[in-house]
């Protein structure tokens, strides 16, 4: 089985930045599981389906082809054979993705897809339930968190960078609503795995976060040193 690093935590904790950079440094596959929920949410919104119509949502998930490709620095998300980008990062898609993610029938399908990626090689997977549900036997499990203010600031900056004119207050409300839903749902709630290492990133730079995860990975007895060293040297 391939070496797996999982990074879970609430929105804005620094998961994507850290996971991408760690995967890039080690030459591991980068798995953005939130992007899968987002791509499906984008389709659900485009089709005008109701977030309450469970049978229609499950059927839609079954009929949808989702894929992740590219490199950590230029990752790609594919929806029914078409690459999607900024359109899956809007506040409306964020909200719908967290509503879909509370549905066990949807989660089952997306979790199966995520697990199947392990045959491709060592990976860094980020989301909410990677260390608890998707890869409970992962070699390294990280739970990233940061105080609310820091998380709001980071998410706001990210959206502005993407050209989405959003108010800080709206970002704060969105984060609070989604985190609450993610934490309180019955199926796979957002929670740190008992064997996860907790990192509070509030006062940390991105580089410090990456270094901390790399150190933990490298000292694991099953860490694939040869492959990762060759990658870093190259
Ligand atoms: O990580 P990101 O903010 O892109 O994820 C969007 C939404 O997808 C989250 O708010 C969460 O509800 C859901 N999600 C999840 N489990 C994952 C990844 C994302 O429930 N592993």
Image (spheres, helix red, strand yellow):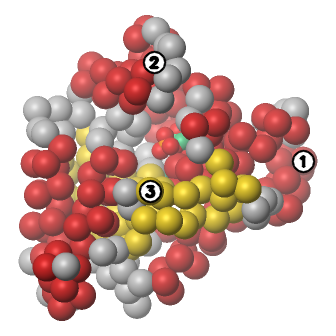
Other-residue count near label 1 (Cα within 10 Å), few / some / many at <14 / 14–19 / ≥20: some
Disc 1: which residue:
56
Disc 3: which residue:
74
Q: Is residue 28 visible?
A: yes
Q: CA distance from mark 3 to mark 1?
A: 33 Å
218 shown above or below 173: below
Horizontal and vertical percent for residue 234? 19, 79
Q: Is residue 95 visible?
A: no
Callout 3 secondary element: strand
Callout in the foreground (3, 1): 3
Disc 2: which residue:
171
Classify mark 1 as within 8 Å of ligand 1 or not, answering yes or no.
no
Please give left or right for residue 38 compared with residue 41 in the image: left
Callout 2 secondary element: helix
The disc label shown at residue 64, or none? none
Callout in the foreground (1, 2): 2
């Amino acid at each position: 089985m391939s070496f797996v690093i999982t990074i879970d935590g609430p929105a804005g904790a620094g998961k994507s930045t850290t996971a991408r950079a760690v995967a890039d440094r080690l030459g591991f596959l980068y798995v953005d599981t939130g992007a899968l929920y987002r791509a499906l949410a984008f389709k659900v919104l485009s089709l005008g389906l109701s977030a309450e119509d469970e049978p229609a949502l499950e059927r839609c998930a079954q009929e949808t082809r989702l894929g992740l490709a590219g490199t950590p620095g230029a990752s790609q998300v594919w929806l029914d054979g078409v690459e999607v980008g900024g359109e899956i990062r809007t506040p409306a898609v964020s909200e719908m993705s967290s509503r879909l993610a509370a549905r066990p029938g949807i989660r089952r399908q997306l979790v199966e897809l995520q697990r199947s990626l392990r045959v491709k090689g060592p990976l860094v997977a980020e989301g909410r339930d990677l260390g608890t549900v998707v890869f409970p036997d992962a070699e390294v499990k990280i739970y990233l968190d940061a105080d609310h203010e820091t998380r709001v600031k980071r998410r706001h900056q990210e959206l502005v960078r993407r050209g989405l004119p959003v108010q800080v207050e709206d970002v704060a409300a969105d984060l609070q609503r989604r985190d609450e839903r993610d934490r309180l749902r019955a199926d796979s709630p957002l929670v740190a795995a008992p064997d996860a290492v907790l990192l509070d990133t509030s006062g940390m730079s991105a580089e410090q976060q990456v270094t901390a995860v790399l150190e933990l990975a490298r000292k694991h007895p099953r860490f694939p040193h040869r492959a990762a060293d060759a990658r870093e040297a190259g």
